[in-house]
């Protein structure tokens, strides 16, 4: 079964936030198989076992980020994996045993037919002396055992799953993960707001510095203009004094 992709993973963010996203997807993936698995669908049970294994593995590595709910869910995912694994073992063994029994019966049928030779009909006593006749009962009993054990394990699985739903094992983990993701989003929004405020403050400080510089330039310009005006007035007075000090010629 191909694992569902985990979206919005970001290496630049905290381990716990990325872990929360992975755990949430793996938990949802496992729970999604429950209706069909509880209804006896063999493939759904197999897929659910794989999903439980994936959830367990990620919780073994990152469960410390989410506290007791993750620790409990990790243990219960392991238990679920074990139960479904035993059911899967029965599903694997049953067709093998039946196949082996069928093969033995075919081999014995061929052997009995050969012993009959050219007889017009088969003597029932030949079948009672088939080469593998003593193996049939053991294999039949094994099939019965595997079928009965599978039914028992299915009952255990259903009881186990309902119990976890009743005590909220998966729900508590989901709340812990969702709470962490919510706090992480709020922290990012707060950090972004603080960054915007910092940039706005820096922009205001730059604007104030520019205004102060402009005011200083304007003051210097006024001082230069005043000094130039005073210098022109002084030069004019000097010219006037020189002109008035020159003696006039008699007419």
Image: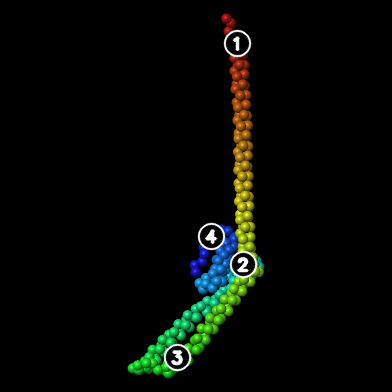
Give the mark nearer the N terminus: 2 vs 4: 4
Q: Element at badge 3?
A: loop
Residue drawn 64% across the image and 67% down it: 168
Q: Rate crowding at label 4 as few (under 14), some (14 to 19) or many (20 or more) other CA atoms within 10 Å.
A: few
Q: Secondary structure at mark 4?
A: loop
Q: Which residue is mark 1?
A: 247
Q: Which mark is residue 7?
A: 4
Residue 124, relative to residue 218: is it above or below? below
Q: Nearer the viewer, mark 1 or mark 3?
A: 3
With 120 as the anchor, is 240 left or right in this view?
right
Is residue 71 visible in this depiction of the protein?
no
The residue located at (61%, 56%) in the rendering is 185
- The kind of secondary structure element at disc 1 is loop
Question: Residue at the spot x=57%, y=62% of the render?
Answer: 21
Q: Nearer the viewer, mark 2 or mark 3?
A: 3
| Disc 2 packing (10 Å; few <14; some 14–19; many ≥20) | many
The Cα atoms of the two marked residues, 4 and 1, are separated by 103 Å
Q: Give residue 172's position: percent from left, percent from top.
A: 64, 65
Q: Which residue is mark 3?
A: 132
Q: Where the C terminus falls, by quadrant? A: top right
Toward the viewer: 93 or 198?
93
- Asked whether the beta carbons under mark 1 and mark 2 sit within 8 Å of each other, the answer is no
Query: Which one is earlier in the sequence, the residue at label 1 or at label 2?
Result: 2
- Upstream in sequence: badge 4 or badge 1: 4
- Callouts 2 and 3 close, C-beta under 8 Å: no
On the image, which quarter does residue 80 sit in? bottom right
Q: CA distance from mark 1 to mark 2?
A: 117 Å
SS state under label 2: helix
């Amino acid at each position: 079964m191909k694992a569902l992709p985990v979206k919005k993973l970001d290496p630049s963010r905290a381990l716990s936030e990325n872990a929360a996203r992975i755990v949430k997807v793996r938990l949802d993936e496992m729970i999604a198989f429950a209706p069909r698995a509880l209804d006896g669908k063999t493939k759904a049970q197999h897929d659910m076992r794989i999903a439980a294994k994936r959830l367990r593995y990620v919780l073994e590595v990152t469960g410390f980020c989410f506290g007791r709910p993750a620790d409990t869910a990790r243990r219960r995912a392991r238990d679920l994996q074990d139960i479904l694994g035993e059911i899967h073992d029965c599903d694997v063994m049953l067709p093998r045993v039946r196949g082996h029994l069928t093969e033995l019966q075919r081999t014995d049928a061929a052997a009995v037919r050969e012993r009959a030779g050219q007889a017009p009909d088969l003597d029932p006593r030949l079948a009672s002396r088939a080469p593998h006749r003593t193996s049939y009962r053991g294999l039949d009993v094994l099939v019965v055992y595997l079928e009965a054990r599978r039914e028992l394990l299915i009952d255990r699985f259903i009881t186990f799953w309902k119990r976890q739903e009743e005590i909220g094992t998966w729900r508590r983990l989901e709340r812990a993960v969702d709470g962490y993701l919510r706090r992480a989003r709020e922290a990012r929004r707060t950090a972004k707001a603080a960054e915007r405020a910092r940039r706005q403050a820096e922009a205001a400080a730059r604007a104030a510095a520019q205004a102060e510089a402009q005011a200083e330039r304007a003051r210097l310009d006024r001082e230069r203009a005043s000094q130039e005006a005073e210098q022109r007035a002084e030069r004019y007075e000097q010219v006037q004094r020189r002109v008035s000090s020159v003696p006039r010629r008699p007419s």
